[in-house]
Amino acid sequence: VNQIKKVLVEDCWKSNHFVSSISLSYEILDSNYYPRSDAWVFHALSESLLRFEDEKTKEIVECGLKKLVDCQYIGAENHALTCRKEFGRYMKAIYRRLKNRG
């Protein structure tokens, strides 16, 4: 557990959110912000704080929870929003505009 926490706090935290994908050598593969994915990490780290007092982890959790509140828990998710879905949504929007023109 401590090794996982160490990797999360030292290698995956990017000033105000966690990177979502890293390689086995800790190279960042995706650094986009995914609020619901971050929420899972904050939940786990909060549980850790109940057992072990750690100021750095506490600061990360507080910063991350503030960002979740600020974005109203809304945002893209890498496992839920694909380019195909985004393209389909875009095409539907164009179709609706054309249809509404008459």
Image (tube, helix red, strand yellow):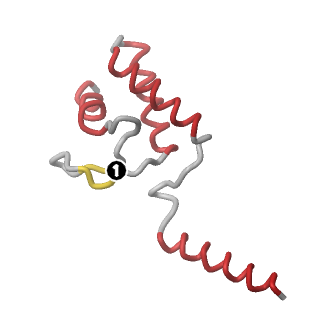
Q: Residue at x 40, y 17 (%)?
A: 49
Residue projecting furthest to the front: 101
Tell me the SS state at disc 1.
loop
Q: Is 48 above or below relative to 19?
A: above
- Percent x, y of residue 77: 49, 54
Q: Is 53 above or below relative to 88?
A: above
- Percent x, y of residue 75: 55, 51
Q: Is 87 above or below relative to 24?
A: below
Q: Residue at x 30, y 34 (%)?
A: 8
Viewport quadrant of the N terminus: top left
Of the pair 23 and 51, the residue shown nearer to us: 23
Q: Is 43 above or below relative to 31?
A: above
In the shown orientation, is residue 31 left or right of residue 67? left
- Percent x, y of residue 51: 39, 13
Residue projecting furthest to the bottom: 102
In the shown orientation, is residue 54 left or right of residue 96? left
Amino acid type indicated by mark 1: Ser
Mark 1 crowdedness (10 Å alpha carbons): few <14, some 14-19, many ≥20:
some
Task: Count up the numbered dots.
Answer: 1
Viewport quadrant of the C terminus: bottom right
Q: Residue at x 18, y 49 (%)?
A: 24
Report the residue marked by disc 1. Answer: 31
- Percent x, y of residue 95: 70, 83
Q: Residue at x 15, y 48 (%)?
A: 25
Residue projecting furthest to the left: 25
In the shown orientation, is residue 5 left or right of residue 97? left
Query: Picture quarter containing residue 50?
Result: top left
